[in-house]
Amino acid sequence: MYPDLKNKVAVVTGASSGLGKAIAQRFAKEGIKVVVNYLTEEDKPEIMIEEIKAKGGEASKIQGDVSQEHDVKKIIDFAIDTYGTLDIMVNNAGIQAEIPTEELSLESWNKVISTNLTGCFLGSREAIKYMLDHKIKGTVINMSSVHQEIPWPHFAHYAASKGGIKLLTETLALEYAPNGIRVNNIAPGAIDTPINAEKFTDPEAKKAVLDLIPMGYIGKPEEIAACVAWLASSEASYVTGMTLFADGGMTQYPSFQSGKG
Ligand code: NAD
């Protein structure tokens, strides 16, 4: 737990499921006032918010599509109107779809790029603009992936979006370091969330993923939320422009694990 996080205000995008939900729940436990952004299925964040409030936490929900400039402004304005400020922006919303590149339509390409990469740009820009105007030494955390590093056939749009997030994060970190605004990136490996639900119900596909993880298990959303909480806290006060890989060793060349090579 990080006492300095108590009473801070955070926005978490795509927070009605998976990693975003775990981050919102962890933030609420830390005493952060959390704005839960969701795209569809209003009842899911509603249930989570009721649970958070029952435990003495504070959270509110706002619908919005992170790829749309107007919606992102609406989400940030909602946080400020509801809780009076904004200290932490987590650009978590993301999508993926398996499509061989020769069949990848411009529409599918644009959908993934505009949600994953443009969504991070818009969320970062709006949060940073507010922090600058109000001299807030806030922090932005973007949700990337091991695929900012590992090429992924059939997921060219996804890998390109995550590679873009890496340099977006590094550039913003450099640009706003003099203002005390930290911008960092989390790169999860394979985590047990709805984005992987179909793959993990197929035992063969699940084993193929497990074979790529030196630590031998699929990560839990709470393990990523713990990284986000640390990056948001003052314990990470000198950390900016970094990618924190939380991947059970997936990026450490697992095929060399048995001493081969
Ligand atoms: P998820 O599908 O549970 O969560 C994604 C969330 O984003 C959903 O709640 C969805 O409604 C929301 N969303 C989608 N498009 C949106 C839009 N346009 N505007 C607002 N919200 C939108 O999956 P997850 O695993 O929790 O994914 C969260 C993030 O983590 C994504 O950026 C994903 O790329 C990244 N990630 C996940 C894994 C993993 O193994 N689960 C690994 C690496 C990176």
Image: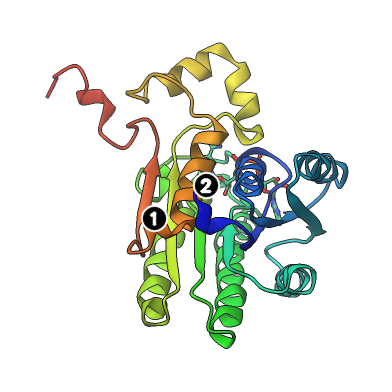
Q: Amino acid at mark 1?
A: Glu
Where does the image place residue 155, in percent across and percent down from the top left?
51, 44
Residue 97's place in the image compared with 199, above or below, is below
The residue under the point 74% across, 61% down is 65
Q: Locate the C terminus by quadrant.
A: top left
User: Where is mark 1, residue-wise?
Assistant: 235
Asked if residue 125 shows in the view, the reply is yes
Count neighbours of disc 1 (C-alpha within 10 A) and say few if under 14, some if 14 to 19, many if 20 or more: few
Residue 97's place in the image compared with 216, above or below, is below
Where does the image place residue 254, in percent across and percent down from the top left?
28, 27
- Which mark, residue 108? none
Earlier residue among tags 2 and 1: 2
Q: Secondary structure at mark 1?
A: helix
User: Where is mark 2, residue-wise?
Assistant: 102
Residue 97's place in the image compared with 248, above or below, is below
Q: Amino acid at mark 2?
A: Glu
Q: Where is residue 70, by image quadrant?
A: bottom right
